[in-house]
Image: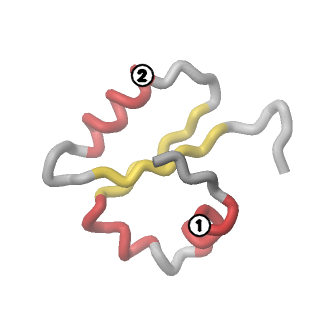
Amino acid sequence: RYTVASDIDLLVIFDDEKSSADNVYKSLMKSIKLPRVELHIIPKKEIRFYKGLRWMKTIEEEGIRIL
């Protein structure tokens, strides 16, 4: 359920062979000009560790895929 006070959770899966989580975070936060954005940054090689989590299942079912 969304309200005016809701934040925007953005899941980013990045290629950790090309960049670090810190660089991805800094670059995105500098580029995204929206209030209340919460970044969740996961390296591509670690995504399998998140697959069984309820949090990830919720994202897969309710999230909006951008790219």
* Left or right for 65, reference 23: right
Residue found at the far left of this picture: 17
Quarter of the view holding residue 7: top right
* Left or right for 41, reference 16: right
Q: Secondary structure at mark 2?
A: helix
Sequence-earlier tag: 2 or 1: 2
> Residue at image x 45%, y 48%?
67
Q: Identify the mark at residue 31; answer none if there is no mark.
A: 2
3D distance between C-alphas at marks 2 and 1: 25 Å
Mark 2 is surrounded, within 10 Å at the Cα level, by few (under 14), some (14 to 19) or many (20 or more) other residues, namely few
> Residue at image x 59%, y 66%?
60
* Left or right for 3, reference 39: right
| Residue 55 in the image, given as x and y percentages of width and height | 60, 66
| Residue 38 in the image, given as x and y percentages of width and height | 55, 39
> According to the image, label 1 marks what residue?
60
Q: Secondary structure at mark 1?
A: helix
What's under tag 1, amino acid-wise? Glu
Q: Identify the mark at residue 22; answer none if there is no mark.
A: none
What's under tag 2, amino acid-wise? Ser
Mark 1 is surrounded, within 10 Å at the Cα level, by few (under 14), some (14 to 19) or many (20 or more) other residues, namely few
| Residue 45 in the image, given as x and y percentages of width and height | 25, 66
